[in-house]
Structure formats: C-alpha cells, structure tokens
Image (spheres, grey):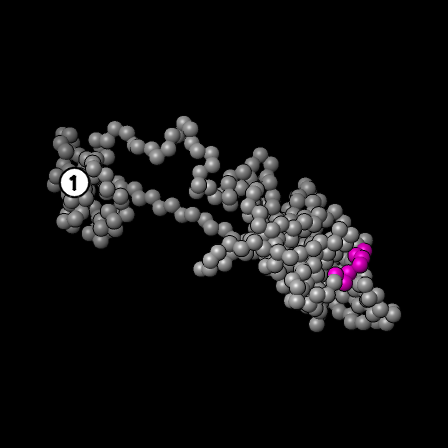
Amino acid sequence: MPVRSVKMTPQRVVVAVVLLAAPITSCGEDNRATTPSLTTPVVQRELFDALDLSSEQLKPVCAAVGKDDYTTAERALARYYRSRTSVPWTFDPQRPARDPNFKDPVAEDAANGKVTGGLVQPWHTFPGNKIDWLYNATVVTRILFLKPDIFVVADTLMPNDKTSHTYEARWHLLTTKTQIDKTTNVLVTADPGLPNMAIVPLSTNGLEVSSASGVTKPQLLGWNVRKDLVPEYVPATTLLHTLTGTGPQCFLTLFLPLRPNAPNPVVRVDSKTPGSAIVVFACGRQLNIAADIGATGGITITETMPKGAPGRQVNVPHRS
C-alpha cells in the first residue's frame, strides 16, 4: 500500500548568556579583584567551550582558557563586553534578505498561520495569521482489509467550529507511471510486468483529485527520499484528494491490488451520501461500501457477484 507521511525538521538554537556578578562596596569601591568565581571549573569549561573565541578582541580570553585559568577568562570576557561599542551584524537589519538559503518552509508556513499535521495532512490557514489550536480538526482513521483483494481506508475529520475548512489527503507512491481516469477519478499505477494498484476515491461529492511528481514549488510533492543513497532524491508520485466544507468530512478510499499488465477494473463509482458508495467493475461485480462518518462508526462491505449472486459481506464496528 502507499504511505502517508509528515516530516518536519525543527531547528534548535542554543544561546549562551554569561552573567558575571560583581559586588560593589557601600563606598563605591570595585571589589571584583577579590571576589571568588561563582561557578565550578566544570561549568566554566563547558561555558567557554560553547563560545566562539576566535575574535582578535577575545585573545586574552582565549589565552586564559588555554591555561585553564577561568577566573582570569571571566574577567577578560567581562572587560570585552563592557568596552565594545557595537555588535557586528551578519546582515543589514534594515534590509533583511527575504529568501535566504536557510529558509524553512515548515516554519514559514507556521509564521503565516498555515499548519499541517496528522495522517491525512489537513491544512489550515487561520484568519489574521493567528494560530488557534482549537481550529484544528480531529482526525479518526479506520482501516479494513478483506482478504484477499480489498483494502478500505476511512478518514473522518471533525472540526471544532462551524466554519468551512479545506482538507487534503496525500498518498505517496514510489512509481511515476500512473494514470487517472477522468470519469471515475481512479488512479492506476502502470509499471510494465509488475503488480500494480488501483486507488479508488469513494466519497466523490465535492472531491478534487490530482497528482504530482518531482514538484519543488510552491511545496515539495512527488519525491522519494532515499537516505544514504545516490541520488538521494528520486521522483515519485503524490496523489492528492482535497475536500472543502463545514462540519464533519470523510475521505473514503478503496485500494485494489492488480495483476501485472491488468487494466483499470472500475467502470463506475456511485456516491450518493457522504461515507458510502457503490463500485461497479467491468466484470459486473459490485461493492457496496459504507463508513459511518462519526468518531465511533464502523465500516460495512457488501459484495455482489457478476450474475447477482451474493458475495462476501462484513460489518466491522469501530474499536477505539
């Protein structure tokens, strides 16, 4: 089966702050020369190891640290902080770069009030770019496998308000050889001589279906990231199912494994109500699939064979 994934790489910035206490006598006499160090040698060493002492002005500090004389190093560092007149900037604070090479798309989206998360990656753009975590929908995922050839995934998204939201389910496929039937919106992989798969969207009312391969802008879509291999990034396929609406929404998806070189077996998908559909196959077989869109609902599958004979039937309740 294809997989869904979210990869976020937060950056952590460690800032070291040095506070040097220097008691002053009541007569205003500087008492620093006789004040013992307030930190242990181990802590002092870790502190100075974390600092960049390569500056010409910090040579006295660096020399004292090289001799493990941390008390002298503290005093030299304090003199440096007191005497410097400006802090050198690595960029013009009046004209900061708008597209630096260290730009993090995840952080940029968060700063613009757009976040994603969960198995089906529900995107939200918050009003006024102010993030409200109660704005996020609750996602409930149910998976049913009926041997030997039926996989059903039901994703219910329940918002915490009455406004309209847009949700996107992304299915990641290793292959780039895919075809989407414009009538049924069924995506079929097409690797010659290999087993393939048909991905059938069942809740089709208002559903938008598209795919992407090797896309870098405005966001990365359709890539297979292979750690420790060359090349590390190889084009793949991302299948996107998008829904917009108020109240609970449901992505109901059928996965059908196919034999090598087999064509798309689905000729029609009838979706009359949210969370249910009838799938009609070229051979005459039908599948009636329904999923309760509530948080505790189950999945029901009723199979009808080509000449009307009853096939498999299963009703699986949801287990929390």
Residue 24 showing in the rendered view: yes
Residue found 59% across the figure and 39% down from its top: 126
Residue nearest the viewer, comparing 122 with 307: 307
Residue found 68% across the figure and 41% down from its top: 163
Instruction: List the residue tagged with mark 1.
Output: 60
**Residues drawn in magenta:** 264-270
Query: Left of 109 or right of it: where is 149?
Result: right
Percent x, y for residue 221? 58, 49
Residue 279 showing in the rendered view: no
Residue found 80% across the figure and 68% down from its top: 303
Quadrant position of residue 164:
top right
Q: Which residue is at the far front?
A: 192
Q: Which residue is at the far left?
A: 34
Which secondary structure class fits the magenta region best?
Answer: strand
Residue nearest the viewer, comparing 231 with 312: 231
Count the numbered circles shown.
Answer: 1
Q: Is residue 71 magenta?
A: no
Quadrant position of residue 300:
bottom right
Quadrant position of residue 308:
bottom right
Pick the quarter of the image with the N terminus. bottom right
Bin the neighbour count of mark 1 within 10 Å (Cα to Cα): few under 14, some 14-19, many 20 and up. some
For residue 312, above or below residue 200: below
Inspect the image, locate mark 1, and give the three-letter code of the amino acid beneath it: Pro
Percent x, y for residue 301? 76, 65
